[in-house]
Image: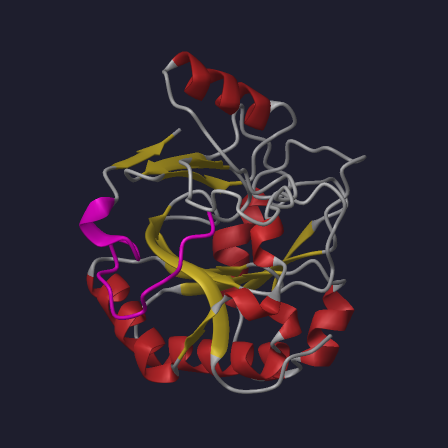
Amino acid sequence: MEVTGRALVVNRLHFPVTALGPGRRLGLWTQGCSVRCAGCLALDTWEPGDGVRLTDGDFREVWRRALDQGADGLTVSGGEPGDQPEALTTVLRAAREEAAGREADLLVYTGHPLAELLRRAPALAAEGLVDAVISEPFRADAPTTLIWRGSANQTVTPFTSLGHERYGPHLEHRPERAPMQLLASDQDVWLIGVPRRGELAALQTALRSAGFRHGQVSWRPAPAMGPGADRRAEPVADGRHTTPAARPRPDSSTAGPDGPATRKDTDR
């Protein structure tokens, strides 16, 4: 399914992201996914109607702030960015314009095969709007230790000289530990990065040991709630290759859409 329109429907924005690409990056996660890989860690990003529309002006403001704070690049993940090809193209054009004269690279994640993404959004390659793409659907039966990838079939494809410079050294890189960020507010805990097999279970165990009572997690379907059920949100332990299902406020500080409420941001 492709969604037309120039306002990108998003789940979340956050800066700085250090676990999805080189350096310190602005992370943007789209809302809506038609790929729906088995074993996906981000079920909360699947439904297209659950997101917020990010206007061109709002994106440019957030991106400029990130660049002024030293952002090395932009990572667009999801959800499935390729399901909104027109809006994705508009955002990447704006990112290029605002970053003119700076070495800020643009990275797009997609669960589609690379050829399908470029069929949907040909300007990404034709106009040089992307420096690298990490493509192919996640396969739970093909675990990998390759950096920034969730399964062995997924590939990193550089498109530009900057893309080859930044991503070429990492094509076969297997770090001892996957780069991850753990962030928390008073109500949510979420993970940015690509966790390896078994790491989410270890996170849940560590949270329980620390006395944190978690509710719904993004890698399992939400339970059905009958009439009269208590629908108040519990604290959420949310681990995935993106972030949790909090709503973005595009006019917020690039410290993250939750601004000062985000009180823990640790890299590993």
80 and 170: which is toward the camera: 80
Residue 53 x/y as whole percent: 44, 76
Q: Which residue occupies the foreground of this view, 156 or 242?
A: 242
Specify start and end residues of the magenta stretch as a single range: 244-261
Q: Nearer the viewer, residue 23 or 223?
A: 223
Left or right side of 179 for 136: right
Residue most extreme to the bottom: 5
Occupied quadrant, residue 94: bottom left
Is 138 left, or right, of 164 in this rendering?
Answer: right
Quadrant of the rendered structure where residue 200 is? top right
Is there any visible trace of residue 99 in the rendered image? no
* Residue 123 image point, x, y percent: 60, 83
Q: Residue at x 56, y 33 (%)?
A: 195
Query: Vertically, is 242 above or below 235?
Result: below
Work out which residue is located at the far top of the displayed protein and give it. Answer: 209
Q: Quadrant of the C terminus?
A: top left
Residue 264 is drawn in which quadrant?
A: top left
Q: Position of residue 121 (x, y in %)?
A: 65, 80
The N terminus - image quarter: bottom right
